[in-house]
């Protein structure tokens, strides 16, 4: 996550970033604005390194692009798991945990396309590739697409998102 922070249009210092871990078996992540992010236990358990960086690049893009959206309150049950977070996101030890109720911003489809494209750009700037974002969306579709919860509950999904990314240069 730290390399991605450095290549944002509006780079954030790790000390400015807070990550909360939600005790939820669904795969999800959110940008709550002001450098605050949430990830679920399900994401940390099921994602490989590539998928995790793809999801984080997407969420960082919402932040980087200044997307403002309606707040959506989800259930309580926030727990802080900085130990597991540090294992999976190198450098997360420098990230400050946050507690409190989860507010997830729900974005428009247009903003989702933008976050996908900008996330792919951030991955390329960080020395990775656009393909990571394509693979991540494919993995999310296969893993969470029919569950009725998780990523696609808060990230309006269409089958076009992967195709749009593939068409982009
Ligand atoms: Zn999104």
Image (spheres, rainbow, N blue to C red):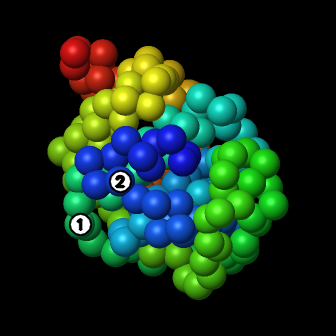
Residue at the image position 51 percent from the left and 29 percent from the top: 136
Work out how far the residue at label 2 is from the one at label 1, CA to CA, in angstroms.
18 Å
Please rate how many residues cluster around mark 2, counting C-alpha atoms within 10 Å: few if below 14, some from 14 to 19, many from 20.
Answer: few
Q: x%, y% of residue 125? A: 37, 29
Figure quadrant of residue 122: top left
Tell me if residue 20 comes above or below residue 49 in the rendering.
below
Are the two marked residues, 2 and 1, in contact with CB atoms closer than 8 angstroms?
Answer: no
Disc 1 within 8 angstroms of ligand 1 (CB): no
Figure quadrant of residue 123: top left
Q: x%, y% of residue 21? A: 66, 65
Of discs 2 and 1, which sits in the foreground? 2
Q: x%, y% of residue 145? A: 51, 37
* Observer-nearest of 157 and 115: 115
| Residue 69 in sight here | yes
Label 1 sits on a secondary structure element that is loop
Please rate how many residues cluster around mark 1, counting C-alpha atoms within 10 Å: few if below 14, some from 14 to 19, many from 20.
Answer: some
Residue at the image position 36 percent from the left and 69 percent from the top: 33
Of the 4 image quadrants, the one containing the C terminus is top left
Residue tagged 2: 11
* Observer-nearest of 75 and 29: 29
Tell me if residue 129 comes above or below residue 122 in the rendering.
above
Q: x%, y% of residue 66? A: 23, 60
N-terminal label among 2 and 1: 2
Disc 2 within 8 angstroms of ligand 1 (CB): no
Residue tagged 1: 68
Residue farthest bottom in this picture: 100
Label 2 sits on a secondary structure element that is loop
Which of the labelled discs sits on residue 6, or is there none?
none
Left/right placement of residue 114 relative to residue 22 reads left
Residue at the image position 76 percent from the left and 66 percent from the top: 81
| Residue 155 in sight here | no
Left/right placement of residue 76 relative to residue 125 reads right
């Amino acid at each position: 996550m730290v390399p991605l922070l450095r290549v944002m249009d509006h780079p954030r210092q790790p000390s400015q970033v807070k990550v909360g871990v939600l005790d939820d078996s669904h795969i999800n992540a959110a940008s709550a604005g002001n450098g605050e992010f949430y990830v679920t236990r399900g994401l940390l358990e099921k994602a490989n390194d590539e998928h995790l960086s793809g999801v984080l690049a997407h969420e960082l893009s919402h932040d980087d692009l200044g997307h403002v959206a309606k707040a959506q309150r989800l259930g309580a049950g926030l727990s802080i798991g900085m130990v597991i977070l540090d294992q999976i996101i190198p450098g997360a030890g420098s990230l400050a945990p946050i507690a409190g109720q989860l507010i997830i911003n729900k974005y428009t489809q247009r903003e989702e396309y933008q976050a996908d494209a900008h996330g792919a750009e951030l991955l390329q700037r960080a020395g990775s590739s656009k393909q990571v974002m394509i693979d991540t969306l494919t993995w999310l579709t296969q893993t969470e697409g029919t569950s009725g919860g998780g990523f696609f509950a808060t990230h309006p999904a269409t089958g076009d998102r992967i195709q749009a990314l593939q068409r982009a240069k």
